[in-house]
Amino acid sequence: MDKQLTNPCYQEIKIQLPCQHFRTVRCNEKNNHFDCEEIINVPLPQCGHNVEIVCKNKNTINTLKCYESISYKLDCDHKITIHCFQKDSINRTHTCHNDITVNRTTCDHFINCKCYEKEDKLSNPCLETITIQLPCLHNKDIKCSHKVRHQECTVLIDKQLPCSHNVKVECRSVNKEVKCSIDIDHKREECGHNVRSQCWEMQEKLSYPCMKVITYTRPCTLR
């Protein structure tokens, strides 16, 4: 008998597997069991999205997660993109990071924030700067949330004091007693020496004895 006829046949042939896919094998192995390594595209039973899977593993399809990107609507009406398998586990109150602009109902100012920050931002005082007119008719810049508070005017204005000097005072203090801090010189009547002090304390200083040191000369009594 020809020796070549008794040796295994290593010629490659194609065989059809039970799944109807074809596979290339050696002729002498054609009766062996082979797993199908073909990549197939099949729909997932839980959502209908297609996934790629090795044919031999198609019986495990029920255990696969679907990573198809889908749009998911939150309770705030914003939509986020998630994987399909997450839709049954994600909470509709999921933290929303969409940028939004919110109108305050108390003052009509707007807030730019993330959607999840909305309630906290609205509960905080409005820090927008506004200009109001005070009863004295001066304008003042304040925080919006402070407009209901009593506001004092700090604008500097000229005020003439009883001593006839003019000083700068805050408007809120115009009717209050103000000490004149202007430096003045005054000559003592009793000795002619000058006294320098702030205007408001001049009378008090003049009531004290003169402390200026002088050189006193007297006639010599030894000659």
Image: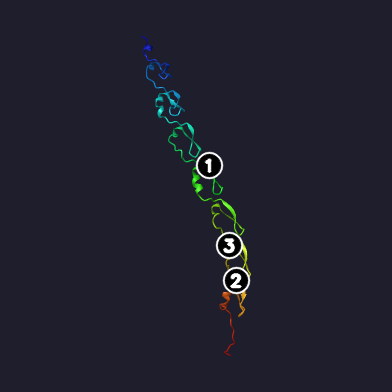
Pinpoint residue 6: horizontal percent, then vertical percent. Answer: 36, 12
User: Residue at the spot x=49%, y=45% of the render?
Assistant: 119
Describe residue 65's horizontal placement relative to residue 132 as left or right: left
Label 1 vs 3, first from the N-terminus: 1
Dot 3, crowdedness within 10 Å: few (<14), some or many (≥20)?
Answer: some
The colouring scheme, among rainbow, by chain, secondary structure or one colour, is rainbow
Q: Determine whether the residue tagged by mark 2 lies in a helix, strand or loop.
A: helix
Q: Determine whether the residue tagged by mark 3 lies in a helix, strand or loop.
A: helix
Amino acid type for the residue under numbered disc 1: Asp
Describe residue 173's horizontal placement relative to residue 66 as left or right: right
Against 126, residue 97 (above or below) is above
- Cα–Cα gap, marks 1 and 2: 62 Å
- Could you say which disc has been placed on residue 99 in the image? 1
Q: Nearer the viewer, mark 1 or mark 2?
A: 1
Amino acid type for the residue under numbered disc 3: Arg
Q: Nearer the viewer, mark 1 or mark 3?
A: 3
User: Residue at the spot x=40%, y=28% of the render?
Assistant: 62
Label 2 vs 3, first from the N-terminus: 3
User: Residue at the spot x=50%, y=42% of the render?
Assistant: 115
Against 140, residue 73 (above or below) is above
Pinpoint residue 28: horizontal percent, then vertical percent. Answer: 38, 16
Against 89, residue 214 (above or below) is below
- Could you say which disc has been placed on residue 199 in the image? 2
Name the residue carrying label 3: 172
User: Residue at the spot x=48%, y=32% of the render?
Assistant: 69
Instruction: Check the picture and name the quadrant holding the C terminus.
Output: bottom right
Against 17, residue 70 (above or below) is below
